[in-house]
Amino acid sequence: TIPRIKGKVTDANGNPLAGASVSVVGAEKRTTTNADGQFELQAGENNNIMVRSVGYEPVIVAGTAGRTVQVKMEKVPEE
């Protein structure tokens, strides 16, 4: 079986972000976060994970199978 990477996406205040796009960099595997900001993705052993959400800066984090990734998103600065 392909290893899975799990994680949780929050805003800068620790509130869960639902509906954020989570994908494996360089692959077509992707998912979205649930109402609690959680995701699970088949991604192999060690892959970079990109997280995007409208109004927030994109984040790339290292994902390791069997570990839970915590992603904190920062709002895009207002101009």
Image (cartoon, rainbow, N blue to C red):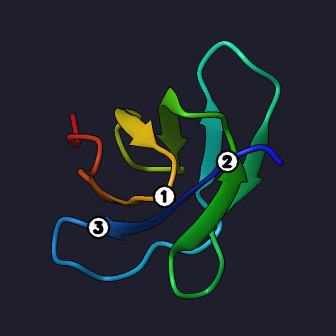
Give the percent coordinates (x, y) of residue 53.
52, 50
Nearer to the camera, 73 or 77: 73
The residues tagged by marks 2 and 3 sit, at their Cα atoms, a distance apart of: 27 Å
- Callout 2–callout 3 Cβ contact below 8 Å: no
Q: Which residue does the image show at 65% across and 66% down from the upper left?
A: 19
The residues tagged by marks 2 and 1 sit, at their Cα atoms, a distance apart of: 7 Å
Q: Is residue 15 above or below residue 50?
A: below
* Amino acid type, mark 2: Pro
- Callout 3–callout 1 Cβ contact below 8 Å: no
CA neighbours of label 2 inside 10 A, class few (<14), some (14 to 19), many (20+):
some
- Callout 2–callout 1 Cβ contact below 8 Å: yes
* Amino acid type, mark 3: Asp
Q: Is residue 30 left or right of residue 18?
A: right
Nearer to the camera, 76 or 65: 65
- The residue that mark 1 highlights is 66
Q: Earlier in the sequence, mark 3 or mark 1?
A: 3
Q: Earlier in the sequence, mark 2 or mark 1?
A: 2
Give the percent coordinates (x, y) of residue 11.
29, 67
CA neighbours of label 1 inside 10 A, class few (<14), some (14 to 19), many (20+):
few
Foreground tag (2 vs 3): 2
Dividing the picture into quadrants, the one containing residue 26 is top right
Q: Is residue 72 left or right of residue 2?
A: left
Question: In the picture, which quadrant includes the C terminus?
Answer: top left
Q: Is residue 48 above or below residue 72?
A: above
- The residue that mark 3 highlights is 11
> For numbered disc 3, what is the local secondary structure?
strand
Mark on residue 26?
none
> For numbered disc 2, what is the local secondary structure?
loop
* Amino acid type, mark 1: Gly
- The residue that mark 2 highlights is 3
> For numbered disc 1, what is the local secondary structure?
loop
